[in-house]
Structures are given as C-alpha cells and as structure tokens.
Amino acid sequence: MVTGGAGFIGSHITERLLEQGHEVLVVDNFYSSTRRNLVHLLDRPNFELMRHDVTFPLYVEVDEIYHLACPASPIYYQRDPVQTTKTSVHGSINMLGLAKRTGAKILLSSTSEVYGDPQVHPQTEDYWGNVNPIGVRSCYDEGKRCAETLFFDYRRQHGLGTKVARIFNTYGPRMQPDDGRVVSNFICQALADQPLTVYGDGSQTRSFCYVDDLVDGLMSLMASPHEVTGPMNLGNPVEFTMLELAELVLELTGSSSQIHHRPLPEDDPTRRRPDISRARDVLGWEPRARLRDGLVRTIAYFTDHSPR
C-alpha cells in the first residue's frame, strides 16, 4: 500500500512496484495530488485506487506500507496547518495501527525539514535540528518530527518493522506546477517567459535529487533487514545556490526571462545538504542523475503538460 500514492513521489513508487509485479493499493484524498499521475496505471490488473483520508482508520490487508500521505510543499501544508499536523500525527497512528494488526513493514517518508534551519552542515542523522516550534512551517516540520517519534515508539513497544527516510529536495516529472517548490516554480516561469522569483540574494543552497534515484533509495530501505530502521538521509549531496539553479533553468529552457529578487520567507533555511554516508554504507545507495540531466527530463515533462 502506498498512502499519498497519487502524489509526485508516491506515483513513481507505485509505478515501480507495479513494474516489479506487486499488487499495489494506492490510498489518497487528492488534497495536494491528482489522478492524472496515475491515469496510465488504471487498467493494470494488479492496481487499485482508493479515495481515503489517513486521519481516519483504514481496514485492509497489506504486507508493506509506504506511508507518504502529507502535503509536502509550503503552499499546500500552510493552507490548512491544523490538518497538516493531523495528517502527520493521526495519519501515522492509523497506519502504524494497521501495520501492527497485519504484521506489515511500514516506511515513513519523513523530511529534511526535521533539521529546520541547520547549524550543522552537512546534516547527519544524529543531528537533532534547529526548528522553530511555533512558526508558519511548524505544522509540517514538527508534524514529521512527531511522526518519527511514533514510528520509533511503535517499534520499541510493539516490535514493528519500521523504516524512517528523511527525504531532501526531490524533483522530476509529475511535480505540481503550482506547488511552490523552487524547481517547478523556475521551470514554469521560464517556459512562460515570466520573471524567475529568487528569494533573498539567491545565495541560499539546496541539493536536488532526481525522483528515480530517490525511489531507488526508498525501495532499498524498505528491503533492508529488520534491524535497519533509520532515520536515513536520502538526497543528493551536491549543493547548488538558488541563483545557480535559476541560471541553469534559463539555459536549458532557452527562456528570455529575467531574475527578480524578493524577501526571504520566514524560517526558510539558508543551507540544506544531506550527509548520505549511512545510506552509502548500509544500503549501497547514492544518487546517479546529474542536476542538468534531471532538469532536461523535468523540463520536457512540463513542456508536454503545459496548458495549450
């Protein structure tokens, strides 16, 4: 089962699992996702789609649970912050309860946001973070931190086969054009010949992981031995400034757009880069796609799916 399976990352996991011959149940309430991400899978005999909100209990029979359900972009998770926290906390309790009843392994898609605006660089899994608990992003940051707590407590108390992945910035086809993430923002603005919006002076950094590489990491973590729980950083350790990303998007799209600067949003971290030593050592995983190559594929997707 893939909760949030109609979302950007969830749809890619679902597709990969189907390709491997698994029977896959996708559970999604379509708050920040779209059926369009799954339309090419609907006629598969081993695929089932259920509209359901994970803040309510669910009674199905499954062997593995990829728990991805939660809006992951600031535009969506700040629109209804109380529901965002409920999705992380109540949703995790319900899915952990399902895993306990069925004996299923369960993987949580946590986030690099648990590190907040980090004072340690790059971020290792034993860093506890620097998070504002009452800020506008707290519903997501603290919601995921609580979800991680629940996963480890269910493991300690009930012996569940739990896995926790901390996902860093990921991009690729099927991103929502209006999700407010920097890659989709820049590509959509460039394709429309609109100014590219860079917050602050553009010197803040991120590291960008192509979605196929991330799916490899998530599936490797799920397949790891019982004693491997995480948390496990999954992301690309190669760091880029926002200005470097903007200039690369302009080059690859051939756009004539200009770069416009705006004030930095509240609690937006200035640096973010994963230390993936644990994933390399334990899973034998590291990303392979270069940013330039991944952007070419992502730009092609947005070009094909832009409104006519």
Image (cartoon, helix red, strand yellow):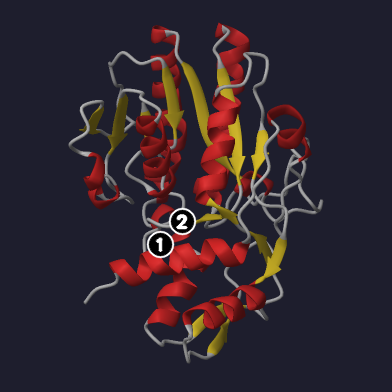
- Identify the residue position indicated by label 2 in the image: 73
- Identify the residue position indicated by label 1 in the image: 179
Q: Is residue 81 visible?
A: yes
218 lies above or below 186: above
Which amino acid type corresponds to the residue marked 2 in the rendered image? Ser
Could you say which is closer to the camera, residue 278 or residue 289? Answer: 289
Name the element at disc 1: loop
Indicate the quadrant where residue 299 lies.
bottom left
Percent x, y of residue 239: 72, 62
Could you say which is closer to the camera, residue 206 or residue 116? Answer: 206
Side (left or right) of 152 relative to 22: right
Percent x, y of residue 69: 40, 38
Which amino acid type corresponds to the residue marked 1 in the rendered image? Asp
Q: Residue furthest right?
A: 120
Contact between labelled residues 1 and 2, with CB atoms less than 8 Å apart:
yes
Side (left or right) of 101 relative to 214: left
Q: Can residue 150 be seen in this view?
A: no
